[in-house]
Image (cartoon, coloured by chain):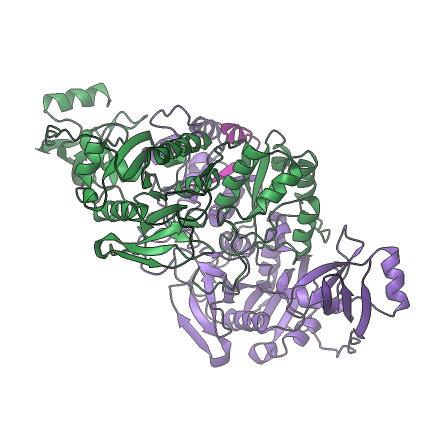
Chain colours: A purple, B green
Amino acid sequence: MYSKDIEDFLKKNNISVGDRIEISGEKGKFEGLLMPRVQGETEVLVLKLDNGYNIGIGFEGTEIKLIEKAKPKKPEKKHKEGKGEIAILGCGGTIASKIEYKTGAVYPAITPEELRMTFPDIEKIATIRSKSLFSLLSEDMNAEHWKILANTIVDEIKEGVKGIVVMHGTDTMTYTSSALSFMLQNLPAPVVLVGAQRSSDRPSSENEMNMLNAVYCAKKDIGEVCVCMHASMNDNYCYLHHGTKVRKMHSSRRDAFRSINSMPIAAVNYMNDRFEVLSKYRKRSQKGSLKASTKINDNVAMIYVHPNIKPKLLESLSDYDGVVIVGTGLGHAPTNPFDDRHARPLLPAIKKLIDSEIPVVMSSQTISGRLCMRVYAAGRLLMGAGVIGDGADWTPETAYTKLCWVLGQTKDMKKVKELMMTNIAGEISERSVMKEEF
Amino acid sequence: MYSKDIEDFLKKNNISVGDRIEISGEKGKFEGLLMPRVQGETEVLVLKLDNGYNIGIGFEGTEIKLIEKAKPKKPEKKHKEGKGEIAILGCGGTIASKIEYKTGAVYPAITPEELRMTFPDIEKIATIRSKSLFSLLSEDMNAEHWKILANTIVDEIKEGVKGIVVMHGTDTMTYTSSALSFMLQNLPAPVVLVGAQRSSDRPSSENEMNMLNAVYCAKKDIGEVCVCMHASMNDNYCYLHHGTKVRKMHSSRRDAFRSINSMPIAAVNYMNDRFEVLSKYRKRSQKGSLKASTKINDNVAMIYVHPNIKPKLLESLSDYDGVVIVGTGLGHAPTNPFDDRHARPLLPAIKKLIDSEIPVVMSSQTISGRLCMRVYAAGRLLMGAGVIGDGADWTPETAYTKLCWVLGQTKDMKKVKELMMTNIAGEISERSVMKEEF
């Protein structure tokens, strides 16, 4: 609710959340849809502009005019929820946000009817069934949500769906895609995560392109967790990425998602039935039955190495079951092998963690490239202390979710190391000279 | 020193560190230069292969053959250290590592003579003077080193040099380049950081290309801190990057350094006098005299947001003077605006830090793109709590060094915010549609 003043004013002027209004004030004239109040800002009207962005405008001293009432919802045509070839699972995020604004609800919600209304072409590609699991911003997702999501996917597969599409916020989409990759092995159906970078009131071409391509991919002969997102600034195709080898590399661009140390699975466009394979992927038809190991340990810290980092920070992690270090370069952290008098090595603190049976896993803040801890003294010292990761080319996010998953399977230090260094879901690529752009 | 067994064996067989040897064992036959022992590995011989990589081979059960003794050092031709147009300051790192292996010394050291021997063409470009400041791996560098380096640069400028080249390890090079950019404003001479991604025994074309281009750039009409590194996988040119807008984006490739949310200053090649300007830069001839504010506060934490992150981690930072959050997407951290029952919001802990006068600054793990905290509820809540950064397009590293520097100037919360959001050294670009690749 807005403040009483505002609510009274709106009521008197027959304005409701969702209506198109014009606000004139000191900063100019703005037209857009009135949004629901955001926590803590009772005196600020939130307006969704036609460019998709929200602005807040102080109520005081403004003139407000109703332009158009929100269209009343059409009475829902009853659509019997059939079996459906593809199950669409909603986890919130921007891709679902259109509905939020239309209904004036505070959180994203996707009903099967709303999905069909938003993406009318969807059933030209496949019959669908859908379920809303969470209504949150993806940065609020954690291991609890991964478990619910993984278990729901298992249920859907048992129900006989041909593929699963997961609508997900983009911020932490690749944490979820990599976590699911470890939790659900030998998939008999693809699990395709999809999202949108730009919120919009009408089904934007981005939302639609991503969504329809995701459904298109979910029908293919694929047996792994993947991410389907825009490939370019134009709306002409998407990339289907391996779930463990992809990362959001731009805060706002539609083509923000990039495969890291790997090529995408394919370039895809449902419109002209394009599925151009770019790298090897697991097929659903491959042998092996679904192996769901959804146990996961969320008591894992992730620490970013930087100049001035204090050994104390590492020392304070003794309550965790595991630690991922986002190190520098080939997999480094301050070790001070040359006895510089100003250096503050983390090595003793790292060693102490490992000696008390808390596995420490390396990753690199360079994002691209492979860890090689044998080149420099720092890497060799860290390896000597028992830091895991030499030779891996995982992203920091995949290293993190993998350690969470491995610690859900075992706490034996030797087995943890063995599992971490075994390629389970494509997270450690074979060595090769990477020629593609990074 | 290696273990006594190994030392005895080497002595008996007239093998010294630096000699070319062949080791045959279980894993095959390896030829390379014997390296000095690394801490903690007394029973493992370290061999530098011709491809530039080091391998460790257990001494036991191997056969070792001397191939060639290291050439004795030529008696040094006395070269009077003159004034020099360009000052070269050595901070260790791979670019200096060649000398390490030749001399058998444990750490990098650059004397003026060694520099001239390694890069014989250097004085065709400029007369040089040089100084070795530190001998360490760059991940061991911190604010203490930045201060010494900044003060030395001020001294060199007072001595009248035309430009400064800083030989630096690549791992944390862009932390240093951004820190120096804030510490040394209105530079009357360029400060060019240079390094090498691949260590090598002989002056590799990479080392040489980077180094000679750096010296070439240090003579130009530039008045800012920059980074000169390989632009492509070929040895045909370098990019000169703005010191605040560059990042190491690959663990091993020679073209690992990329400008972020900016174009490089120029594409350069000393060989054909190419200095192709790609973006605006500050000229040394511009008005304003050198402003050295080398005070810096190193009591700043950097926290990477990830699923499962515990509020406790943030709560434990009350001893710090500032905190940089490497958030998700447009500048997010868990805030749980939609009351999800599994979410663990960091918002209260962040608010508590700010309320106790510890500034909290946002950056994004997407690396590329601008922060925009007005789009989603999470961003608005964080801004409401006082998190600084909306609209900035700095890298996490630059956000970090800037906060360290700002807290060296003031602790007043209002002034900290003002300074943080003021573009000081190109770290916040003007808004524009970025068309280049990211």
Residue situated in front as seen by the camera: A216 or B280: B280
x then y, percent, for residue B388 = 62, 45
Residue A33, above or below A428: below
Can residue B10 be seen here? Answer: yes
User: Looking at the image, is B282 positioned above or below residue B128?
Assistant: below
Residue A75 x/y as whole percent: 79, 78
Find out whether residue B309 is within the magenta segment.
Answer: no
Q: Identify the residue at image location x=37%, y=31%.
A: B155
Q: In the rendered image, which quarter is residue B354 located in? A: top right
Q: Quadrant of the C terminus of chain B?
A: bottom left
Give the quarter of the image for residue A118. Answer: bottom right
The residue shown at (31%, 48%) is B217
Report whether B303 appears left or right of B248.
right
Horizontal side of B165 relative to B334 (left or right) equals left
Q: Is residue B192 left or right of residue A251?
A: left
* Magenta span: A310-327
Residue A432 sits above or below residue A51 on the image = above
Q: Is residue A313 magenta?
A: yes
In the picture, the quarter occupied by the N terminus of chain B is top left
Q: Is residue A107 visible?
A: no
Residue B92: where, in percent of width, then height? 31, 34
Seen at 59% across and 31% down, the residue is B320
Residue sitting nearer the eye, A120 or B331: B331
Counting labels gives 0
Identify whether B65 is placed above or below A252.
above
Give coordinates of residue A116: x percent, y percent: 66, 75
Q: Work out whether residue A323 or residue A436 is closer to the camera in this orientation and state it.
A: A436
